[in-house]
Image (cartoon, rainbow, N blue to C red):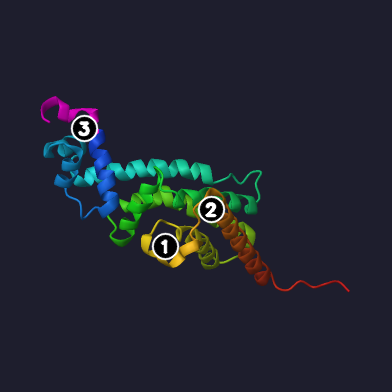
Amino acid sequence: MTGAAEHGTDTRTRLLDAAMRLFTERGFAKVTVRDITAAAGANLAAVSYHFRDKAGLYEEVLALGLRSAQEMNAEVMLPREGHSPEERMRHYVRQYLPRIIRTDGRGGIYQLLKHEMSDPTPIARTYVRQAIMPRIEFLIEIVREMLGGTASDARVQRCVMSIQAQCLYFLPDPFKNLVAGDWQPGTSDQIREMADHIADFSLAGIRALGEARRGPRVRPR
């Protein structure tokens, strides 16, 4: 394919689709421009024309993931007004967990981020700031409200990381599935049951920490 056809939107879309698939499978460092153009049925110059270089193409792939993550954030985070911390926590886990387990259109970004975790690129910082930190800050607000305003930052952060870790455990991982076995929820009902367990477990733990920090209650005689 040459000429004007290489400059069309169809070529750009094919390059993005191929790059998303290959970057997701292998990570940024292990994919070449030639790999992408071969998979997209385009010539090497098309990447330069549409995206500047491989880094520019990768940035665009992450931007697609960022938009998807921001849409998800709007769905998983209830506003503080009119909702208790417990309600916001439970809604968060119930909405967030299925999006991690299901390998739907959004699932690819989680696999891509697994590569970023082991071999971060400079672009990862932007994704973390704009997509992940809003969820962390949302959970920080919930935990701090439950523990009380005088709770230490370290205590709040540990609680938030515990909540996230329980959810992130269910990211698709063939090796982990050998260990998890029947623990890995598959049906919608099983996912909902696991989400409720994570919420119940987390809420009970946070309440217990809050009560311990406030000290024992004095019963009236």
Q: Which of marks 1 and 3 is nearer the N terminus?
A: 3
Image-based side of 18 in relation to 164, left or right: left
Kindly identify the amino acid type of the residue bearing the numbered disc 2.
Ile
Disc nearest the viewer among 2 and 3: 2
Foreground: 183 or 55?
183
Residue at image position (49%, 53%) is: 186
Q: Main secondary structure of the magenta part?
A: helix
Secondary structure, mark 1, is: helix
Give how far apart the Cα atoms at labels 2 and 1 are. Answer: 15 Å
According to the picture, the residue beneath numbered tag 3 turns out to be 11
> Residue 77 got which mark?
none
| 143 shown above or below 51 | below
Image-based side of 211 in relation to 141, left or right: right
Secondary structure, mark 2, is: helix
According to the picture, the residue beneath numbered tag 2 turns out to be 191
Mark 1 crowd level (few <14, some 14–19, many ≥20, 10 Å Cα) = some
Kindly identify the amino acid type of the residue bearing the numbered disc 3.
Thr
Give how far apart the Cα atoms at labels 1 and 3 are. Answer: 38 Å
Image-based side of 42 in relation to 147, left or right: left
Mark 2 crowd level (few <14, some 14–19, many ≥20, 10 Å Cα) = some
Foreground: 185 or 221?
185
Q: Note whether residue 68 is visible.
A: yes
According to the picture, the residue beneath numbered tag 1 turns out to be 177
Q: Is residue 40 magenta?
A: no
Q: Which of marks 2 and 1 is nearer the N terminus?
A: 1
